[in-house]
Image: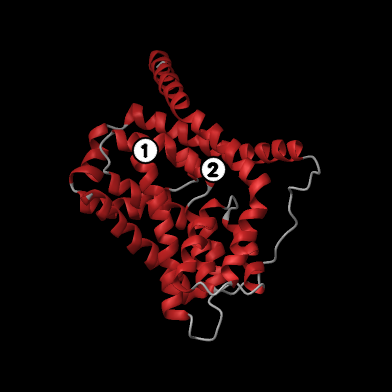
Amino acid sequence: MRDWISREAVYLWYYLDIQIRQIAPYWALGIALGSAVSVFGKGAIHSAFAKIGRKRTGWLGVIPASLLGIASPLCMYGTIPIAASFSEQGVKDDCLAAFMMSSILLNPQLIFYSGALGRTALLIRCASCFLCGCAAGWLVRLFCSGSGKPFFDFASFHEGKSRDTDPHLLLRFLKTIWRNVKATGPMFALGILLTALYQIHVPGGLVSGLFGKNEGFGVLMAATIGVPLYMCGGGTIPLLQQWLLDGMSMGSAAAFMLTGPATKITNLGAMKIVLGWRRFLLYLAFVMLFSLCTGLIADLL
């Protein structure tokens, strides 16, 4: 028994060390740059979005709205109060939908985390999240703009007091880094641990069989398991990296990276409040269908 425990500890330490060396630099860079965007760029991003959303830009206004949603460093419960404020300022629902959808899926911090997955996965993630935001905005514009009623119900959300209030920019930046470390560090560590245990105990051929050989079924499986398995962006990057090394197709990874953040429990709770049951179910159907199509297209390319 003692020999087994000692052997397991050695294996665990070995794989933990590999994972930390491979992933930790991207996590640290994401923390630093994401905090910098939050402290120095958040105001400019939100100001630019408010201006775009009030202009009569037509269908094209959704494009910069989706890009600015990706650039916004806020989580969903931070984004919705801001979106409520934008709505009061006259920003149109299609731009709000694009901004909120892409903000759910991606942020500056997660972009740098995803660099650990390789250039191809990073490009697919950025492009698919941007296009998903655009598609959400265009669908809202196409089917709901003429109803005369607002698409979102922001009555339960009010913009809270910002915690970035320190008058010294450097101290504000350091405090934001510390908050991000506390918020993402535990899940990042859990992701590293789960990946190390996976490497020790799960045969590599299992992932290849599920997500690699039968690409259509693999994409569907990945889109489905993204719903219960997604912890947070930093926590899933180590697992995704290992799954890709073990034969997961790029399309399956793309589907997982879309359904995961879009159906994370906290995000679902917020979206249910602002959408109501009927539109909330449409939101789920849209996410699953878009992720499935994205995965299939990624595998074809």
Where, by quadrant of the figure, is residue 185 drawn? top right
Closer to the camera in the image, 250 or 285: 250
In this picture, is 18 found above or below 263? above
Is 183 positioned to the left or the right of 283 in the image? right
Of 215 and 150, the residue lying toward us: 150
Instruction: For mark 1, give the secondary structure.
Output: helix
Q: In the rendered structure, find residue 7 and report the number of the disc placed on it.
A: none
**Quadrant (top left, top right, bottom left, bottom right) of the N terminus:** top left
In-image side of 256 versus 85 (left or right): left
**Residue 213 in view:** yes
The residue positioned 30% from the left and 58% from the top of the image is 292
Task: Tell which of 148 and 248 is nearer to you.
Answer: 148
Q: Nearer the viewer, mark 2 or mark 1?
A: 1
Q: Which residue is mark 2?
A: 109
In the picture of the structure, the residue carrying the numbered disc 1 is 119
Residue 11: percent from the left, percent from the top?
39, 19
Q: Secondary structure at mark 2?
A: helix
Residue at 48% x, 58% y is: 102
State the residue lying farthest toward the left.
213
Q: Give whichever of discs 2 and 1 has the lower sequence position.
A: 2
Position of residue 124 relative to residue 82, above or below, is above
Query: Are the residues flagged by discs 2 and 1 in contact, CB closer than 8 Å?
Result: no
Label 2 – label 1 distance at C-alpha: 16 Å
Q: Amino acid at mark 1?
A: Arg
Residue at (26, 43) in percent of width and height: 249
Q: Amino acid at mark 2?
A: Gln
Q: How is the image coloured?
A: secondary structure
Q: Residues within 10 Å of mark 1 (few under 14, many from 20)?
A: few
